[in-house]
Amino acid sequence: VQLMESGGGLVQTGGSLRLSCAVSGDIDRINDMGWYRQAPGKQREMVAYVDSTERPKYADSAKGRFTISVDNASNMISLQMNNLRSEDTATYYCAVGEVGTPDEMDYWGKGTLVTVSS
């Protein structure tokens, strides 16, 4: 399974970005998908996650601002980010898994950098 993120960049506080992740390969066993981020000097954290029930979960910091979506026809995972804050600056990774828990994702992209300037 291969994942490739796109859509990162520089945006001002309050702006929006849409991240995309193209998923390819043997995806039949994939049950869950998510977006994670890692800021400099901090641990990686889950931002948004969706499993086979299609009920999304969000980090508290992302609720009301971020939306995860999955297009099964095109094997794309997207993250719409609105009202961005400086603390959203991080490298964002998409990930997919077979187990069905956000803490046990099996495949990861290389990441895309999001920088929010004030």
Image (cartoon, rainbow, N blue to C red):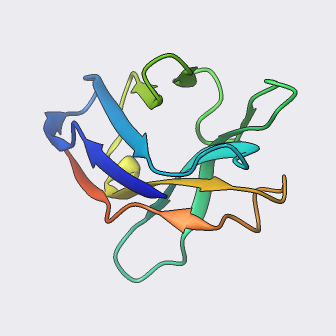
Question: How far across and down, in percent of the image, does residue 31 sit?
Answer: 76, 44
Residue at the image position 25 percent from the left and 32 percent from the top: 13
Question: How far across and down, in percent of the image, does residue 69 sit?
Answer: 55, 22
Residue at the image position 30 percent from the left and 47 percent from the top: 5
Q: From this view, report whether residue 28 is shown above or below residue 78.
A: below
Residue 8, quarter of picture: top left
- Viewed as shown, does residue 96 lie left or right of 54? left
- Viewed as shown, does residue 101 lie left or right of 16? right
Q: Which residue lies furthest to the bottom in this view?
A: 41
In the rendered image, is residue 59 in sight? Answer: no
Question: How far across and down, in percent of the image, does residue 54 sit?
Answer: 79, 24
Quadrant of the rendering where the C terminus is positioned = top left
Looking at this view, is 107 or 83 the one in front? Answer: 107
In the rendered image, is residue 76 in sight? Answer: yes
Residue at the image position 32 percent from the left and 65 percent from the top: 110
Residue at the image position 48 percent from the left and 64 percent from the top: 108
Question: How far across and down, in percent of the image, does residue 109 sit?
Answer: 39, 60
Looking at this view, is 32 or 9 the one in front? Answer: 32
Give the number of callouts.
Answer: 0
- Viewed as shown, does residue 105 lie left or right of 113? right
Residue 60, quarter of picture: top right
